[in-house]
């Protein structure tokens, strides 16, 4: 059996039942604290640079060129992956995969734990995943894995992630990339 | 659907698009005299609604009819009659999944007939608005006011808001779209009002001008992709993993359901802002006798507070504007120092009393009294509420029958 997470086995209690809500605009949520976005970005970069098998899970909103912002974001995700030395495993759609998912090559919101267990992922970034599916997946990951989750959300954020960055658009993603470069230098990587 | 643009100046009806804050709080208002059903029409007129589906059932028929008039006048994009209440709630879901701002209305047995759809709405994260004009659901059949049906809706995953009067209803409909469509909320909102008492009676109501309206709904901010067979990523429908019996599907279902409930919790700060608080207090804030109520029961309790003043008894009302999310912290704060909490209700089961007891358990030492309770179309005269209080205090009854 793979390692269980903080709530273990069942997604209950979910973060909002532990009094966590998404951060207000301009701020980030780090564990159970509202912090400045910079602070959370640095911690996210550190987690991705120091934990085993860091992985980015890009969702449909950055995988498909459905508008100009999506295309630009996709390039930034790729750059982020290269800088962080992270794998990129896509969540290209939301359908449950039956009879069996190939966890080496994809992740699915209905059973994200399988991909995390299989690849022994200890830190990950969700980006471009529609909010509902990100939330469903993050709750399962929180319960059933010890993976450090980072949500890079274009909307209001995901309180079930360990770090929630909200309103993340091109400018914010570029900022995160700059912070990754700084943290990398500080860590001597 | 209307063209989606952050910089849209006018909607399809030619109304100037303004912010929800401007429409609700800042726009100048003028006084009108109208029924609750007419207030629904006035709210929908200013809400840039894309689609509405109707079916006649008393007492909501007039509201549904008036939304139809708005379609004729060009304020509502699509309007048609469903085959039944079940059909209406399914069809409105289809419209919402396709990215439309939608509203419909129902009452009593119509609610029950449509029931399977409400958890489906919540589970598919569509921000449909249902104006529920509460009516009895008992057998023998009743068309009279009674809010028993609300207790059935409490755990469907929809937000439940409760309007006291036509003014509340008008404001709640506009606020309802605004809160329900927040990307991190995005669940249906049921705006409840007591049938007949509000839907069919006329009262003064303050309205902003009708040449301004809410910004159109932007489905591209929805937490699930809208249905669009042509443009990726729109092909991702809600697959029925329910059909699979294995641990994975169970875990997904558990997470999914928690997520829907989480979404309701996330609505708190938005609802607090757009409703100016989840509760309203009336009367002497230091009074030890508190009425906790919603809808017209709150209105009658306010009258009872005035009558009790004449009896030398200080009392106050805590009116709950939202039932889901339940204003837990607000209630706990407001009943500090209370010795007696009366919960007057328009139903036989006392669902609000149960809610109040649940959230005050171990928190308040006040005695909770589930009375008075009327049902089946009975009115709740303020004197009846006063009588309950006087029974408790042993005081001589002056006002009461």
Image (tube, coloured by chain):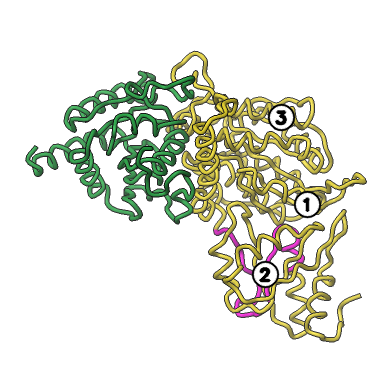
- Badge 3, how many Cα within 10 Å: few under 14, some, many 20+? many
Chain ID, yellow in image: B
Q: Nearer the viewer, mark 1 or mark 2?
A: 1
Measure the alpha-carbon separation of dots 1 and 2: 22 Å
Q: Is residue A12 left or right of residue B384?
A: left
Which mark is on residue B317?
A: 2
Indicate which disc residue B167 carries. none
- Mark found first going from the N terminus, 1 or 2: 1
Q: Which residues are magenta?
A: B277-301
Chain assignment, label 3: B
Tell me the residue that label 3 is attached to: B53
Drawn colour of chain A?
green
Residue A59: image location, x then y, percent: 37, 27
- Answer above or below: position of A65 versus A21: above
Residue A105 position, x and y percent, is 33, 21
Quarter-of-image position of residue A81: top left
Are circles 1 and 3 on residues that touch, CB within 8 Å?
no
What residue is shown at x 77% (from left), y 32% (from top)? Answer: B85
Decide: marks 1, 2 in contact (CB < 8 A)?
A: no
Mark 1 lies on a secondary structure that is helix
Q: Residue at x 43, y 51 (%)?
A: A21
């Amino acid at each position: 059996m793979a390692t269980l997470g903080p709530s273990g086995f069942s997604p209950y209690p979910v973060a909002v039942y532990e009094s966590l809500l998404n951060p207000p605009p301009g701020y980030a949520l780090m564990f159970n604290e509202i912090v400045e976005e910079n602070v959370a970005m640095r911690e996210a970069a550190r987690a991705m640079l120091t934990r085993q098998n860091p992985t980015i899970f890009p969702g449909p909103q950055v995988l498909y060129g459905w508008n100009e912002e999506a295309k630009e974001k996709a390039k930034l995700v790729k750059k982020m992956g290269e800088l962080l030395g992270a794998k990129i495993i896509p969540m290209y759609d939301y359908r449950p995969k039956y009879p069996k998912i190939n966890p080496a090559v994809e992740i699915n919101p209905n059973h994200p734990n399988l991909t995390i267990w299989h690849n022994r992922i200890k830190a990950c970034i969700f980006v471009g995943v529609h909010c509902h599916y990100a939330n469903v997946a993050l709750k399962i990951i929180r319960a059933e894995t010890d993976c450090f989750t980072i949500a890079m959300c274009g909307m209001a954020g995901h309180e079930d992630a360990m770090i929630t960055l909200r309103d993340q658009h091109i400018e914010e993603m570029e900022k995160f990339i700059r912070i990754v470069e700084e943290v990398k230098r500080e860590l001597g990587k | 659907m209307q063209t989606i643009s952050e910089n849209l100046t006018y909607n399809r009806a030619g109304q100037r698009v303004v912010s929800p804050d401007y429409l609700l709080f800042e726009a100048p208002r003028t006084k009108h005299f109208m029924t609750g059903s007419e207030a629904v029409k006035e709210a929908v007129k200013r809400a840039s609604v894309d689609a509405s589906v109707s079916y006649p059932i008393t007492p909501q028929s007039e509201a549904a009819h008036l939304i139809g008039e708005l379609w004729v006048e060009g304020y509502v994009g699509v309007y048609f009659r469903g085959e039944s209440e079940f059909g209406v709630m399914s069809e409105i879901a289809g419209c919402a999944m396709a990215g439309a701002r939608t509203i419909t209305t129902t009452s009593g047995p119509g609610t029950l007939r449509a029931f399977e759809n409400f958890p489906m709405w919540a589970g598919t994260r569509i921000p449909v608005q249902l104006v529920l004009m509460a009516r009895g659901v008992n057998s023998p059949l009743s068309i009279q006011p009674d809010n028993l049906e609300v207790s059935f809706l409490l755990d469907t995953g929809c937000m439940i808001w409760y309007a006291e009067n036509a003014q509340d209803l008008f404001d709640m409909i506009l606020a309802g779209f605004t809160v329900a469509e927040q990307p991190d909320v995005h669940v249906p909102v049921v705006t409840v009002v007591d049938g007949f008492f509000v839907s069919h009676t006329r009262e003064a109501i303050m309205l902003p001008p009708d040449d301004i309206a809410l910004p159109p709904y932007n489905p591209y901010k929805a937490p699930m992709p809208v249905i669009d067979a042509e443009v990726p990523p729109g092909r991702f429908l809600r697959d029925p993993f329910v059909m699979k019996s294995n641990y994975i599907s169970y875990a997904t279902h558990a997470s999914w359901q928690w997520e829907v409930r989480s979404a309701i919790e996330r609505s708190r700060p938005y609802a607090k802002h757009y409703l100016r608080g989840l509760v309203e207090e009336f009367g002497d804030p230091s009074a030890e006798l508190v009425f906790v109520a919603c809808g017209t029961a709150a209105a009658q309790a306010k009258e009872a507070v005035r009558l009790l003043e004449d009896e030398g008894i200080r009392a106050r009302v805590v009116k709950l504007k939202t039932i889901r999310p339940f204003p837990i912290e607000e209630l706990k704060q407001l009943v500090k120092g209370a010795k007696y909490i009366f919960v007057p209700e328009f139903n036989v089961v006392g669902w609000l009393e149960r809610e109040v007891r649940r959230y005050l358990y171990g928190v308040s030492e006040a005695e909770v009294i589930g009375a008075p309770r009327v049902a089946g179309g009975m009115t709740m005269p303020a004197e009846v509420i006063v009588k309950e209080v006087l029974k408790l205090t042993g005081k001589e009854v002056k006002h009461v029958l």
